[in-house]
């Protein structure tokens, strides 16, 4: 029982923390170029919501991915 628990907790932590890690790494590159962007989490949330709604209403995951990318990109234009 302990072995299963000892494997599940780190695995869940990696799975749930990976999107924040990737966004943080992207923000590091942005800050090194001189741009301060504190709205990355909002862009991620809007992209995730648009991707989910696009996939839910169309039933096509590729359209959901495309809508998520477009929504995140459009919100980043506000920052630009």
Image (cartoon, rainbow, N blue to C red):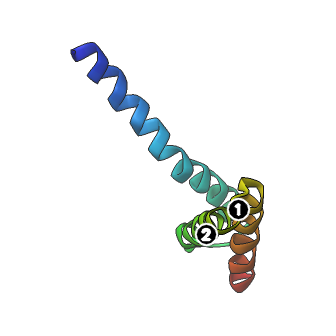
From the viewer's side, name the closer residue of 65 and 46: 65
From the viewer's side, name the closer residue of 39 and 53: 53
Mark sitting on residue 53: 2
Vertical placement of residue 9 versus 58, above or below: above
Which residue does the image show at 66% across and 62% down from the upper left? 55
Q: Position of residue 49 (x, y in %)?
A: 57, 69
Badge 2, how many Cα within 10 Å: few under 14, some, many 20+?
A: some
The reply to whether the C-beta atoms of the residues labelled 2 and 1 are less than 8 Å apart is yes
Vertical placement of residue 3 versus 26, above or below: above
Say which quadrant the N terminus sits in. Answer: top left
Which residue does the image show at 63% across and 56% down from the upper left? 28
Q: Mark 1 points at which residue?
A: 64
Q: Is 15 on the left or on the right of 35, as rendered?
A: left
Which residue does the image show at 63% across and 71% down from the upper left? 50
Q: Where is residue 29 in the image (x, y as percent from the top left)?
A: 70, 56
Q: Where is residue 34 in the image (x, y as percent from the top left)?
A: 71, 69
């Amino acid at each position: 029982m302990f072995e299963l628990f000892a494997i599940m907790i780190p695995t869940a932590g990696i799975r749930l923390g990976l999107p924040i890690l990737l966004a943080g790494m992207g923000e590091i590159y942005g800050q090194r170029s001189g741009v301060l962007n504190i709205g990355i989490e909002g862009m991620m949330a809007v992209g995730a919501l648009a991707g989910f709604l696009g996939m839910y209403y169309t039933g096509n995951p590729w359209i959901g991915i495309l809508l998520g990318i477009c929504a995140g990109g459009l919100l980043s234009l506000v920052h630009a």
